[in-house]
Structures are given as C-alpha cells and as structure tokens.
Image (cartoon, helix red, strand yellow):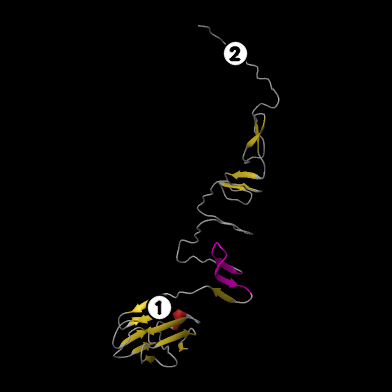
Amino acid sequence: MAKFGWAYIDCADSGSDDGGAFGPTGSVQFMSGAGNTTGSVNFMYYSASGGGYTANTLVLSGTLAVSGTISASIYHVEDIALVDATGSTYFGNSDDDIHVRTGSMYVGKSNGTQIFNVELGSEQIAFAGARGLYTAIGSTGTTSSNASYIYGVTAAGNVEVRIHSAAVAQAGAVYVIKDEVTSRAGSITLSASVGSGETIDGGAFYNLAGTMPAISLYSNGTNWFVF
C-alpha cells in the first residue's frame, strides 16, 4: 500500500465557478449563475429583531406570485384593493368576532339575480324575499328574546307572553306576535314586567282578544309600543 507523507492540491481560482455566496447578511440566497448565489435587501430573513421586525421574520419587498396554497395561522393585510375568490369563504370562529364593511354590499346568484343589496347613499336595503326567525309559544309564561322575530302562540286557554326588556332589544327592534289557535277560550296577555318599569303603550300589560289576533311591537330602547 502506498503511503504519502503530505499532499498538495492546486485549487486555482477558475473564475466564476467557485461557489461563493454574496449579498447582505440575512438575505435569502438564490442562484445567480455559474455556481454562485447572492441575496438582496428586498428578500431578508431576520433571525433576531432588527429593521423594525421581530425575530424569525421573513420579509419580501416586492410582488409575490403563488400558484399553490398559502396556509397561515394569522393572515394580516393592511390594504386590500380587490378580492376575487372562488368557492366557499368563512370569516370568524368566535361569537365575539366583529366584521366591519364600509360601502355598499351586493349578494346575488351566479346568473346575476339580486338577492340582497345594501346601497350606500339611498340608505336602503333591497332584497328578493325575507324570512324572520320563528318561535312557537306552547306554554304560558314564555319570555320572548332577541333570537326570534315572529312568535306564534300555540298554547290554548289564557296565555301570558312576557316581552323581554326593551333595553336588551335596543331601539328599533321589531317583533310580531300572532295567535295561531283558531278558537281560543281565553285571551293572550303581553307583559312588560321583564324589564324593570317598562311599559307597552304606557301600560304594564296589553291584552289580545278576539279571533286569532296579531300584534306588532317596536322598542325605543326604554319601552315597547304597538304599531
């Protein structure tokens, strides 16, 4: 077996194929040709806080084109000029989430048929049809709530319906109460006693009598009124 006490290898500089890396410290490297890589201040990775960014931050100054999917735990955008989305979209995951929109809003079918439209300037809402949430009152002493708009009284005999607080409903809230019993042996009494000191048209109670009567109520935030 041959033995070498020492060896000399001539690694002469061949020019541009030395595999050098260039660019500012922290720049993300990309191939610049002939075995060399370089970086730019427009594409930086901050391993420690600096430049106004926290540690472990990747910063791109320019345009990012992605043909695949972007997945992130938090997606923060400071300025959006246009959103063009296809498929289902979900916003929020908590009951206390608030989604604020400024300007007009249009909801329609793919064929252009309008379903819902809020037009800024006219301060009006246009819609193709409406369906208020419904609750059946099957027993006396039932208390209304903000959860429904229409209440159908299905319990027979004398029935007391307790109207929830006008302060909770807030000013402008509207509710409809309808007797669904075709032949009632008794009456329906609306009670405003749930809200402390609140009234319905100035009284603590309001009676519905006759054949299948109905009533509409609105709140001014303090009391209830029949209309």
Residue 147 occupies which quadrant of the picture?
bottom left
Q: Is residue 103 above or below residue 81?
A: below
Residue 118 occupies which quadrant of the picture?
bottom right
* Spatial separation of the CA atoms under disc 1 and disc 2: 91 Å
Q: Amino acid at mark 1?
A: Ser
Q: Is residue 133 above or below residue 108?
A: below
User: Which residue: 46% across, 88% down?
Assistant: 225
Which residue is identified by label 2? 7
Which residue is identified by label 1? 145
- Check disc 1: other Cα within 10 Å, few if <14, some if 14-19, many if 20+: some
Can residue 126 be seen here? The reply is yes
Q: Is residue 39 left or right of residue 142?
A: right
Residue 212 occupies which quadrant of the picture?
bottom left
Q: Residue furthest right?
A: 15
Q: Which mark is residue 174?
A: none
* Magenta highlight range: 103-120
